[in-house]
Image (cartoon, rainbow, N blue to C red):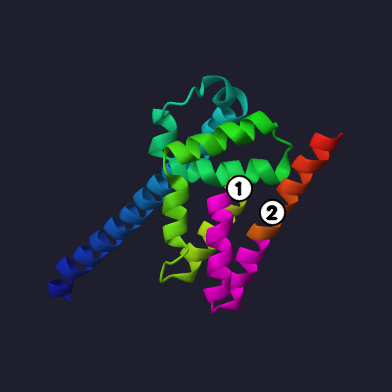
Amino acid sequence: MMNAAPEIIAAVGLFALLILAAAASLAVKKRLRDRDIDRRLDITDYLINRFEDEFSGKRIRCMDRRFGLFLDLFVRLRQSALLTDSFKEKFVAYCSLRRTEKTLVRRLDSFFAYRRCRAAVYLGYIATDAGRAALEARLCREKRWRVRIYIVHALCELVCGSIEKRMAAQA
């Protein structure tokens, strides 16, 4: 009976240590999530309020660090709000400056379907002729129907954008 006391104390100490490690892990996870939320808000604020004024044909360091996040937020803004044509043109110019389109066209040939889907969505919103040609070529070769749906949606976005431009030019 007396010999079991050190083992019990060690087990209780180990259990307390595990609880402490779990609490620290949760605290770190919450802090990282809060930082991600703040970063998204800052980037959205930058895109809405300052990007159009600051872009002058040169690379912007704050965008280069988290460009994937900028692309995600650009797509969300483009879906939810009416952006000006000059903003869209400047963003496409910035994407061409970073050679984003070339990277996305390469991702259309990725082994992983998820990467092909994301590349198709981004190419649909960036809306360039080379991107459209790559999407059309990939649509003919694609075997998975889920990826085909994303490619068709991206092509529809391109067609709708060109129709909107024609209607605006006629008005």
Identified at 57% across, 31% down, the residue is 90
Residue sitting at the far left? 3
Overall secondary structure of the magenta section: helix
Q: Which residues are magenta?
A: 128-153
* In the image, residue 171 above or below residue 144: above
**Position in image of residue 37 (x %, y %):** 52, 40
Q: Residue at x 42, y 59 (%)?
A: 106
Judged from the image, the secondary structure of the residue bearing numbered disc 2 is: helix
Kind of residue indicated by mark 2:
Glu
Q: Are marks 1 and 2 in contact (CB under 8 Å)?
A: yes
Q: Is residue 34 magenta?
A: no
Q: Nearer the viewer, residue 47 or 35?
A: 47
Position of residue 152 measured from the top left corner of the image (x, y, whole percent):
66, 65
46 vs 120: above or below: above
Q: Secondary structure at mark 1?
A: loop
Note whether residue 34 is visible: no
Give percent across and percent down for residue 124.
Answer: 61, 53
Residue at (75% x, 41% y) in the render: 165
Q: Quadrant of the C terminus?
A: top right
- Give the camera-side residue of 6 and 129: 129
- The crowding category of the residue bearing disc 1, from other C-alpha atoms within 10 Å (few below 14, some 14 to 19, many at least 20), is many
Quickly name the residue at label 2.
157
Judging by the rendered image, the residue that carries numbered circle 1 is: 127
